[in-house]
Image (cartoon, rainbow, N blue to C red):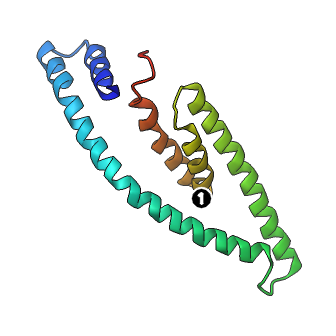
Amino acid sequence: KGVENFAKWVSQAATLLPQDLRDWIGQKLPEYASEFLSAYAAAIPGFLSSIAVQLVFFLIYLGFWLCDPLPVSTEVSQLFKSYLFLKSVVSLLYATLMASLLWMLGCKLWVLFWVLTFVLNYIPEIGPILAGVLSLPAVLFDSSIPDP
């Protein structure tokens, strides 16, 4: 239903286009969006399992570093511990803000995206962007959110 509402909105918003093109968009957009979402949904389990495996390895690695098993200087060890602590605090803050925004928008999956955003924020540069992009379909195609 969310895809149909989005298609109606697009066809109504495109007032500069000819009527037959708007009708075609209104008919074809739900079909194309459903195909895209099906492919997207089919790829999600593989993506999540890959993230889960990487998360397990990361946590093992993090545990070794926090326990200080490698013979490194105290200064380097403290620096690394400080970095991981601050990165965790920033990740927690970013995930909380993102989840709050999704909650305010009425997205019922805000808890899932809180966890996903927290984990993905550890990936430099693209992690926070990826977390934001992954939350877009949950908001755009949610049929329980009223039309604008």
Residue 75 as seen in the image, left or right of residue 142: right
SS at circle 1:
loop
Q: Is residue 128 above or below residue 143?
A: below
* Residue found at the very far left of the displayed protein: 20
Residue 8 location (% of width, % of height): 27, 18
Residue 9 location (% of width, % of height): 32, 18
Residue 35 location (% of width, % of height): 23, 42
Q: Nearer the viewer, residue 88 or 72?
A: 88
Location of the N terminus by quadrant is top left
Q: Nearer the viewer, residue 99 or 16?
A: 99
Location of the C terminus by quadrant is top left
* Residue found at the very far bottom of the displayed protein: 71
Q: Amino acid at mark 1?
A: Pro
Toward which corner of the image does residue 2 lie, by quadrant? Answer: top left
Residue 142 as seen in the image, left or right of residue 76: left
Residue 85 as seen in the image, left or right of residue 75: left
Q: Is residue 119 above or below residue 4?
A: below
Residue 11 as seen in the image, left or right of residue 66: left
* Residue found at the very far right of the displayed protein: 74
Toward which corner of the image does residue 4 lie, by quadrant? Answer: top left
Residue at (65, 74) in percent of width and height: 60
